[in-house]
Amino acid sequence: MDPVQEFNASAHSYDAFSDIQKEVGLRLLGYIDGLPLEVDALVDLGCGTGWFTLEVLQRLRGVQEVFGIDPAPNMLSLWKERLPQGKAILGKAEDPKVWEGLSGIDLVVANSSLHWVGDWQALVDLVYEALRDGGCWAFNVFAKGSFGEIARALGIRFPAEGFLSLEEVKGLVGERFALLNFEVMQLERQYNSLLDFLRFMKGTGARTGRRFLSRERLRRAEEDLRKARGGLRARAEVGFFLLKKG
Ligand SMILES: C[S@@+](CC[C@H](N)C(=O)[O-])C[C@H]1O[C@@H](n2cnc3c(N)ncnc32)[C@H](O)[C@@H]1O
């Protein structure tokens, strides 16, 4: 299954399993809290089930229009249930079609979604064109190699191997935007078993790249990780960006 199909299939379990996405989302909301910006029109990229969009809306006054963009139809219909006043747009953030008719946007946000984007150059240009002068873009992304220790112990390849590094993202957005804030978070979470970690991945739609792993393989990987690290820790690097047009 491609990543979008995985997200689509996991839409109904997403809210129950997405504590990591919530943790990084809450940190991103800190950027929006302090933003000296009148927001009339808001876009959420990779909006998922809508919990994050709602939190953003609660922090802003006077938003007239809210758009949620996501390529997974099941995610988008949950978003629409949560935000009946919003405009749901089906498609990938880097697809010019989803941006048709969107201009003069004040704020674009994206929590835990843009590492899935295939064409970052296109994305940067599209967000730039849609924002008004002085408009802002606040997002976070998981970096290349996130959760790599677990992948290596299991002998498989996680999709995060194909994500961009934070320096690459910084370089791309820096070509067009002013960088108001950039921070790197080293995320670390302890799991009781690798199965718990894999359940989190599956429940949120983040692919692990392999359907079947034998009990023996899991046991050996757990043993290796415990020996090397003293426990089962999932580690990821997450970059937080606040950008301004003009
Ligand atoms: C981990 S979820 C995050 C959802 C939501 N932003 C949140 O804070 O819970 C990632 C979302 O990104 C969406 N996605 C995947 N590829 C995408 C792309 N190329 N453009 C926009 N969204 C994408 C998925 O369908 C999924 O809903």
Image (cartoon, grey):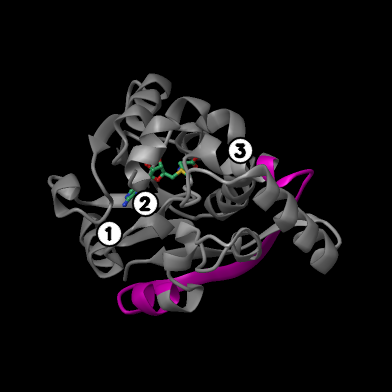
- Residues drawn in magenta: 169-195
Image quadrant containing the N terminus = top left
In the image, is residue 195 above or below residue 15?
Answer: below
* Disc 3 secondary structure class: helix
In the image, is residue 89 above or below residue 131?
Answer: above
Q: Which residue is mark 3?
A: 199
Q: Which residue is mark 1?
A: 127
Q: Is residue 93 magenta?
A: no
At 67% from the left and 41% from the top, the residue drawn is: 195
Task: Please report whichever mark, 3 or 1, sits nearer to the chain's N-terminal start.
Answer: 1
In terms of depth relative to the viewer, which is nearer, 108 or 159?
A: 159
Q: Position of residue 88 (x, y in %)?
A: 27, 32
> Which quadrant would residue 83 be assigned to in this image?
top left
Whether pointer 1 and pointer 2 mark residues with C-beta atoms closer than 8 Å, the reply is yes
In the image, is residue 165 above or below residue 69?
Answer: below
Three-letter code for the amino acid on which mark 3 is drawn: Arg
Q: Residues within 10 Å of mark 1 (few under 14, many from 20)?
A: many
* Disc 1 secondary structure class: helix
Q: Which residue is mark 2?
A: 108
Task: Please report whichever mark, 1 or 2, sits nearer to the chain's N-terminal start.
Answer: 2
Camera sees residue 66? no
Q: Position of residue 58 (x, y in %)?
A: 52, 33
Report ligand 1 position as a quadrant: top left
Image quadrant containing the C terminus = bottom left
